[in-house]
Each structure stands twice: as structure tokens, then as C-alpha cells.
Image: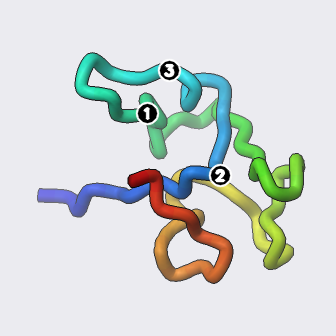
């Protein structure tokens, strides 16, 4: 069973604005067409200079913000 990814509250992609009936953002980390941006930088790189995407914007980055 795969570990559940925890997404940064600052991570944005087109489908990430939609929510499931349970309130979860609909981000597909396996999408080959998703384009990601960071709300802090308004660019595809975070404030740490690293690229942003569903798999790399996790709790191990200093700029991570929990959604809860």
C-alpha cells in the first residue's frame, strides 16, 4: 500500500483548486500534464529555488505549509 502524500497548502495546479466531497484537493501526482506553481513565488520553483510538484513539495522542505 502506497503512503498517502501530504500536499503543501501553497502548491497549485489547475485541478488542485477542485475538492472532493470530503474536502480533499484533487491533485494527481501521476499526471503527466499537470503544471505546478507555488503561491509564495508565483512560479514553478519554490522559495528554496527547487522545482515544485506534487511529489517534491512535502514536509521535508522548509517552505512546506500544512493545509490543516
Quadrant location, the N terminus: bottom left
Is 41 located above or below residue 14 in the figure?
A: below
Q: Could you tell me which secondary element the residue under label 2 belongs to?
A: loop
Which mark is drawn over residue 10? 2
Which mark is drawn over residue 63? none
Residue placed at 76% from the left, 64% from the top?
51
Which mark is drawn over residue 18? 3
Which mark is drawn over residue 25? 1
Residue placed at 47% from the left, 36% from the top?
27
The percent coordinates of residue 61 (x first, y second) are: 60, 79
Mark closer to the chain start, 1 or 2 = 2
Is 24 located above or below residue 63 in the figure?
A: above
The percent coordinates of residue 39 (x first, y second) are: 77, 48
The percent coordinates of residue 17 (x first, y second) are: 58, 25
Mark closer to the chain start, 3 or 2 = 2
Answer with the quarter of the image where residue 62 lies: bottom right
Check disc 2: other Cα within 10 Å, few if <14, some if 14-19, many if 20+. Answer: some
Cβ–Cβ under 8 Å for marks 1 and 3: yes
Amino acid at each position: 500500500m502506497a503512503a498517502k502524500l501530504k500536499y503543501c497548502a501553497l502548491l497549485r495546479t489547475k485541478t488542485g483548486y477542485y475538492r472532493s466531497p470530503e474536502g480533499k484537493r484533487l491533485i494527481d501526482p501521476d499526471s503527466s500534464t499537470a503544471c505546478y506553481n507555488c503561491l509564495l513565488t508565483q512560479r514553478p520553483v519554490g522559495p528554496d529555488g527547487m522545482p515544485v510538484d506534487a511529489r517534491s513539495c512535502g514536509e521535508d522542505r522548509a517552505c512546506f505549509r500544512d493545509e490543516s
